Image (cartoon, grey):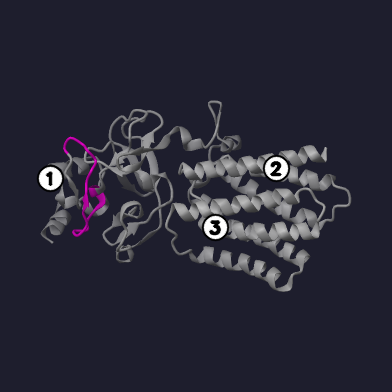
Amino acid sequence: MIGAWFGVALAASFAGYAAYLAGLRRHLVEPNRASWLIWSAATAVEASTYAAVNPDAPQRWVFAFATIACVAITVALWRRSAWSLPSRTETVCMAACLSSIALWAVFREAFWAHMLVVVAVPVSFWPTWASVAADRGRERSPAWGLWTIGDLATLLVAARSPGSPVGEYAYILVELACHASVWFMIGLATINPWRSLALARGAFGARSGDAFRVGETHLGRAVFAGRDFASGETLMPFTGRRFRSDRLPSLARGRADRFVQVTPSHVMGPSGRIDDLINHSCAPNAGLRFGADGVRLVALREIAAGEEIAWDYSTTLAESNWHMICQCRAPDCRRVIGNFATLSPERQEWFRARNLVAPYLRRKDAVGRDRAA
């Protein structure tokens, strides 16, 4: 019976990491980089200390596999996007967790190092909890449910093993509670927690996978509609850290240039999600709407499944010194993408009438001052 539960634990853990990596590659999840950096280091220590404290426990192989998978996801995050400085909360969490790991390296006391890692686990989850609380869609993945199931199976393996010490349960129980908390946070957003496993129309996969897909065009990666959208329907939120325009990297070009102006003096940086991949078009089928709930991409007209989603970059730009050669291939392509003032007065009013310009561009005199500059 122990062997059966061990198989369930290993299979659920493997399936969870595979599903999460798939969601990461399809830009369906937005992992917190600080948490994964901590986890990749902590799981390595945890696997080592657990094996030292429980040398004959079969579940040590589950933790060893988790170490490899955490490192793989962290590397994928590193390669996929530019890393920004951690927030104050993330810095505190990273310092607290990594200090416990350092204590093990110094004192080589496996049991107490194991207990320190147990304490560090919920601290390392704090950035992810904060991220999910701000936007549950960032972690919409069946992986959290699979990891919870794997933790339950691992707990059963430990409980059925003869002579298992009480300390053996500590890490498993804490990890189970943390995984389950994220699972229910994303699941309860849909009222039915089971939906966080992304069981929709009989398909087992990432919940948002039906709405969009990432493909290739002559411009590189692009986002396509996975289903039909009605005119005026919200497609997705635009997220990312905001910072002053004077901190914008001067050499941001190509894939690194994923910045959206959101105030006269602030820009929104890359989110690491699918909104980063939406291209410009001089004849867009979507546009950005600024509101109290944030920045949302909405459909300008009906969008058919399979159609590329694009918006006009000029509708947020007040900067007078930014421009980009346009290759959208629309019949009325402007050839150069500039600020909002470079649009014709008629086109400016067309966007204003649909509330699809940034707030600081809604007044004609504001655009006039920029044009004069």
Give whichever of 342, 350 is nearer the camera: 342
Q: Residues within 10 Å of mark 3 (few under 14, many from 20)?
A: many
Above or below for 123 versus 288: below
Q: Which residues are magenta?
A: 314-332
Circle number at residue 293:
none
Q: Earlier in the sequence, mark 1 or mark 3?
A: 3
Q: Secondary structure at mark 2?
A: helix
Residue 192 % position (x, y): 58, 35
Residue 176 % position (x, y): 69, 49
Give whichever of 11, 132 is nearer the camera: 11
Magenta span dominant secondary structure? loop
| Residue ID for mark 2 | 10
Q: Earlier in the sequence, mark 1 or mark 2?
A: 2
| Residue ID for mark 3 | 127
Q: Secondary structure at mark 1?
A: loop
- Amino acid carrying label 1: it is Ser
Q: Residue at x 89, y 52 (%)?
A: 163
Above or below for 348 versus 48: above
- Amino acid carrying label 2: it is Leu
Residue 322 painted magenta: yes
Q: Residues within 10 Å of mark 2 (few under 14, many from 20)?
A: many
Residue 62 % position (x, y): 71, 48
Pointer 1 and pointer 3: residues touching (CB < 8 Å)? no
| Residue 184 visible within the image | no
